[in-house]
Amino acid sequence: MLINSIPYKFRAVCFGLLTVVLAGCTADTRQDEPDAPVSFREVPAQRLNYRFEADVPPPELKLTPAMIQQRNEAVQKFFDENRPLEILNRTIESPDKTKFAAVYREIADEESEFRLDIFSADGSFVRKVTHEEMAIHFPDTIVWSPDSRNLAFVAMVRAREGMVPAEPDPLQGKGPEELAPQEPQTGNSNSDGGNAETAEEPPGDKPPTDVITFRTEQIYLCNSEGLDLKPLTKNEGLMYFYFVWAPDSSSLVSLATSITEWRVREARMKNAGEVFAPEGRPRLVEKNGRERLLDDFPTTVWPVWSPDSAKVAVAFDRQIRIYDAIGDTPTQAAVPLQNELLLASKSWEEQKKAEEGPESLATPGSDSNSAGTGETADGNTNSNTQAPTSALPDPSTLVSFNPIVAIEWTEESMIYFQTAFVKNYLDSAENVSSFARWHRLILSPQESMMKKEEN
């Protein structure tokens, strides 16, 4: 009765003032919550949900300069005119298009060992990077950081008589002798391979001679001018054979294995008549040299970064694991996909048979497709509800039920991965690559994280 006696206009003004006050209080309350996540970057790997989608179109992948460019014409001309006894392998353009990394070798060098120089965008020589006792291995992995400030590559001591120990017999399980880093020799950096006839180069032709080299492959880093060369990893006995930069250029994720494991696997695959495919354990390597082993299980699938540089995804057989790359207490989560892939393969094959007939599923070596179906237990597993074991099809009856062979993280909330049956033999005529299918995971924060954001 009392409120009805107040004039209408006055009541409207009071109501408006009350609304403004309440809105201000609400805003202040939200500002007092510093831990509310605002993006996937702030959601720990353990707090991610996923939704599996089978047999989707392949992701659209962006080609990098390193993928599409082999040799810069101006740099090739420099080698033709000034270094007739050196063979240019490839040039790698920096993302900002101001520099080229020239990968080459001298005639006397081993075919698997290379050297590195920096050239400007117009093909002018800038500086030698690697000294005489340093050899670059795995030249396909040489890559500029996304911000063009650094160049990363794998190198070790050059293989010359008396410089490296004899290889052990890998099938006898004998490990290498105790290895020690090699201090580079001082003096003139020119080789003894007969380059006296080549034209003299600018002052940059003498690389630093105080950079230590190791007897197994390590990751090295230099800046865009070829200066400040240093080993980023220093784990003698480990071989780093693959790495990729984080999108924000802060870190690298790599694959590494022991020299003994490398040689044993190489010998076994050779005896089986297969092309060697290296296998390693994922490691996070920061630019300051700090390193973290992400997992004890090896994989042949290249790891990938999330677009926001906050996480790393790695595939193991039929499982994907996600690791935090930032934070003081990083977490990890496993996404076992065996049951989902079993059901997806059954559905896919039934549809295939209905459309094209049973002969469409025949392939050489298909009896090997079901190998390695075991899953690894992980206390941090974050998965959808699994189908009852009794309802799952027999893996041995499905030729399209295959391990993960590739993974791509295209968006913060979307991971693509490919399953396929792949066998590459020394006799390429026997190679088999079949049933390549793309799938994806749609990621989302767990409900508890969403509620925290809303409060």
Image (cartoon, rainbow, N blue to C red):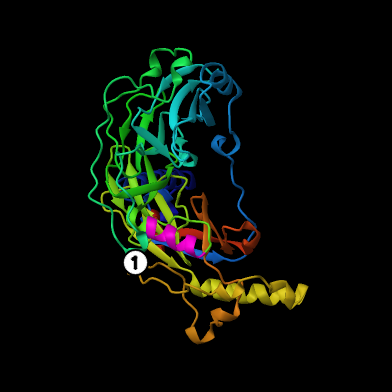
Identify the amino acid type marked 1. Answer: Asn
Camera-side residue of 214 and 84? 84
Q: Is residue 171 left or right of residue 180?
A: right
> Image quarter for residue 72?
top right
Q: Quadrant of the C terminus?
A: bottom left
Q: Residue at x 41, y 55 (%)?
A: 3
Q: Position of residue 419 (x, y in %)?
A: 56, 63
Answer whether residue 445 is visible to the viewer in this image: no
Answer whether residue 329 is visible to the viewer in this image: yes
Examine the structure image and report whether residue 265 is included in the region drawn in magenta: yes
Count of picture labels = 1
Q: Main structural element of the magenta stretch: helix, strand or loop?
A: helix
Q: Is residue 421 left or right of residue 283?
A: right
Q: Quadrant of the N terminus?
A: bottom left
Segment tinted magenta in the rendering: 263-272
Secondary element under disc 1, as helix, strand or loop, is loop
Q: Position of residue 140 (x, y in %)?
A: 50, 41
Identify whether 277 is placed above or below 212: below
Q: Which residue is mark 1?
A: 380
